[in-house]
Image (tube, rainbow, N blue to C red):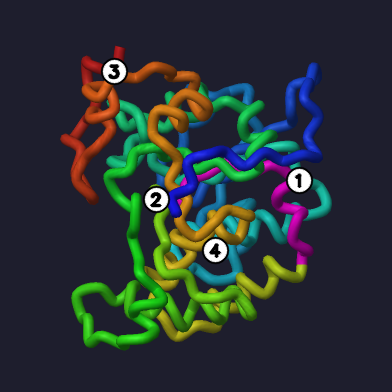
Amino acid sequence: MIASKITVDSDVPSSNPVPPKTELVFAAMKASNMSWVQENLPDWQVNIYRADAKPNETELTVPMNKGNEAMVYLTYIIDRYSSLPDIAIFLHGDRYQWHVDNPLYDSVISISHLNLDFVLEAGYVNLRCAWGVGCPAELEPARYLRERPDDHVHPTAVEYPDRFMELFPRVEVPEVVGTPCCSQFALSKVMIRERPLEHYIRLRRWLMETELDTGISGRILEYSWHMIFGKPAQYCIDQRECYCRTYGHCNMTDEEIQKHWVWRGLQLPKGWPGQSES
């Protein structure tokens, strides 16, 4: 069943007069130009992990550059588990990316418009509402487990059932996994601490020790984050409700929603968005 309603964290008070303490967590590389963050978001607490850097080369890095952004996200949670902010927002390092959910594909817009009260209520909020990639169904783990198809075109789908059982022992393999791509989300401190620190250490150990390559291991976690943080396997919120509650863009028309649907892996023009940024 597609999850069309929002799960509310009952431990969060209905009114919160004090602004929540919020931090940005970026998965970047040594070559990433992250100046856009300070230039456009000067009031935010920022954590920039450069995944390919050695400890003596940067302030924040990871024990192993593997699993794309997943290693950064897990490392932040492990390192900060006892001193988490009220909200942590997990992002890729580039400002403009095809999967960023606004017509300019601009992370500054998404961060600035994010409804922090909704994050506190829901606990886990995917920064992407569009169903173009990942929803209503991205994977069929139970069928792949039963049939074991020889599917060289979809290696993540082939690997997912067995890896799901490693990540979620004693949990039934779901028939369908669906959630918007692409591993950018916000978490409340309360939601992170629903699981003990040891759980995240185990997940990072799995990522470090798995024989899967970076691409596949990262994609397996991409389509597992929502379940790690308490949501059902098929978690595709109605797009209008999602845009309204996540970004305050309510009563969107079909045409407006369609502007958020792009081809997977779209290459933005060099110098995007140029003069249209204003």
- Decide if residue 66 is in sight here: yes
**Cα–Cα gap, marks 3 and 1:** 36 Å
- Give the secondary structure at mark 1: helix
Q: Nearer the viewer, mark 2 or mark 4?
A: 2
User: Residue placed at 78% from the left, 21% from the top?
Assistant: 15
Q: Which mark is residue 277?
A: 3
Could you tell me residue 8's position as x and y percent? 67, 38
Q: Nearer the viewer, mark 2 or mark 3?
A: 2
Quadrant containing the C terminus is: top left
Sequence-wise, the earlier of marks 3 and 1 is 1
Q: Nearer the viewer, mark 3 or mark 1?
A: 1
Q: Residue furthest front?
A: 1
Highlighted range, magenta: 182-197
- The amino acid type found where label 1 is placed reads Val
Q: Which mark is residue 182?
A: 2
Check disc 1 and report the residue beneath it.
190
Check disc 4 and report the residue beneath it.
71
- The amino acid type found where label 2 is placed reads Cys
> 218 or 11: nearer the eye?
11
Could you tell me residue 207's position as x and y percent? 54, 74
Q: Are marks 4 and 3 in contact (CB under 8 Å)?
A: no
Q: Nearer the viewer, mark 1 or mark 4?
A: 1
**Cα–Cα gap, marks 2 and 3:** 23 Å
Residue 28 in the magenta stretch? The answer is no
